[in-house]
Image: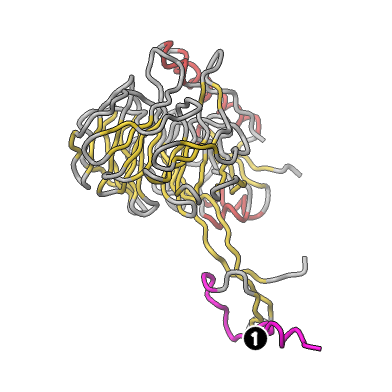
Amino acid sequence: MALFIYGTATNTGKGFFTVEDRRAFFLGGYPAEVWVVGNNEKGALWLAEKNGVEKTKAEAQALVTAEVEAAQAAWDALSEADRLVRDRPGPITLP
Amino acid sequence: MATYKEIFGKKIQSLASDIPAAQGEGQIWYNETSDTFKTSVLSSAWASGGALNTARHNLSGTGTQTLGLVFGGGTTNSETEEYNGTSWTESGDLNTGRGSGTGFGIQTAAVMAGGHDAQTTTEEYDGSTWTASGVLSTGRRYLAGAGTQTAGLGFGGYAPPSSSGLDATEEYNGSSWTAGGALSPTTFASAGCGTQTAALKMGGAGAGSPGPTAGTDTQEYDGSSWSTGGAMLAANKSNQGAGIQTAALTFGGNTTGTQTLGYDGSSWSTKPSLSTGRTYFAGFGTQIAALACANNPPATTVEEFTTAAAVKTVTTS
């Protein structure tokens, strides 16, 4: 069985994920509103309750990569002085 | 021979209901109703907080988890928002919109100093309006800060076109800045917290090639000079901090993303991670109740770090 469930969901702010959620299952937030949650009953229920759209790992990774590439392009457009003190966004590999 | 009860006085209490979590920390008791042994333990976690109204990065912030304040961002953002523990409300704009400065104080008496390019600008907030105040002697951005509106501290930073960090420490008295003890090693994009006479610098960047290099360095300020504290567990920069010199928290950052560490005045320990890696964001509060606001690329998302006692059932597995 896969360790994680992948999906997209809009972060609605306070209460979107709680202390109890964090203790009940793994939860990681990534660019493009991609969420990775532990593959257990509580994790699956959380994604469903947030009107999340489940994705395959490949689909979720593609969304994250596209967002990272956009951020990298924005960094490339910075002045040399700004680039000196701000790291270029690195690739993100979903767990 | 004396019995255990005679020496230590009490057996495990047998109670009809649980001891309140905050009072029961470290105790074990028997709950007659549920027929279980209970205890109360402290635990921490990050949860989502109310979203900012304006997405941004390189903003500054100060205050507490229930009386928070963020301001500025990017290169020219002047927006100020106040947090009540649930939601953010827009307030008076900065007179000089800017990001990459430092903020300290409380929600109704805050300071923003420095900022984009290498600004000397200092502004004071009174709960509704920002007013210009005495300028920094050394203009800079990516400096860190600590303290209050009448006893503040700004340290480190970076003044382009140089790509090296600064050692300049300046003390603020509510109207003007004066020189403090030099920071060593020179640093920018570190986290800061504490007071003017007991401040903490956590990590940050030093000169490197091809880009700035993150460090594990912790420095403690006593009101006149900096001394080395316990090294962080991982090198980091653009991280944020909360708390005081002997009970601090640092979180997020370019190098470790979601990592959260706690400091007890001499050494660091691992705390529960943020859900989302954050850089060039704002962080403040205390070691047990902190806020992490926004992100880079610009975002409105906020996370709240909470430490609280909770009653747990003792099981054998």
* B53 or B270, nearer to the observer: B270
Secondary structure mainly formed by the magenta segment:
loop
Does residue B209 lie above or below B217 as drawn? Answer: above
Q: Which residue sits at x=26%, y=43%? A: B90
* A25 or B145, nearer to the observer: B145
Image position, residue B298 (x, y; %): 41, 30
Left/right of residue A19 with respect to residue B137 in the rendered view: right
Image position, residue B58 (x, y; %): 39, 30
How packed is label 1: few (under 14 Cα within 10 Å), some, or many (20 or more)? some
Name the residue beneath numbered marker 1. Answer: B14
Q: Which residue sits at x=48%, y=40%? A: B220
Q: Is residue B73 visible?
A: yes
* A92 or B173, nearer to the observer: B173
Does residue A54 lie above or below A89 as drawn? Answer: below
Residue B2 belongs to the span the image colors magenta: yes
Q: Is residue A34 visible?
A: no
Q: Amino acid at mark 1?
A: Ser
Q: Which residue sits at x=56%, y=66%? A: B310
Q: Which residue sits at x=57%, y=73%? A: B24
Residue B256 occupies quadrant: top right
Q: The C terminus of chain A appears in which quarter of the rendering? A: top right
Does residue A77 lie above or below B58 as drawn? Answer: above
Image position, residue B241 (x, y; %): 46, 42
Residue B270 belongs to the span the image colors magenta: no
Magenta-colored span:
B1-23
Q: Chain of mark 1?
A: B
Q: In the current view of this chain or complex, which residue is farthest to the front? A: B224
Left/right of residue B6 with respect to residue B265 in the rendered view: right
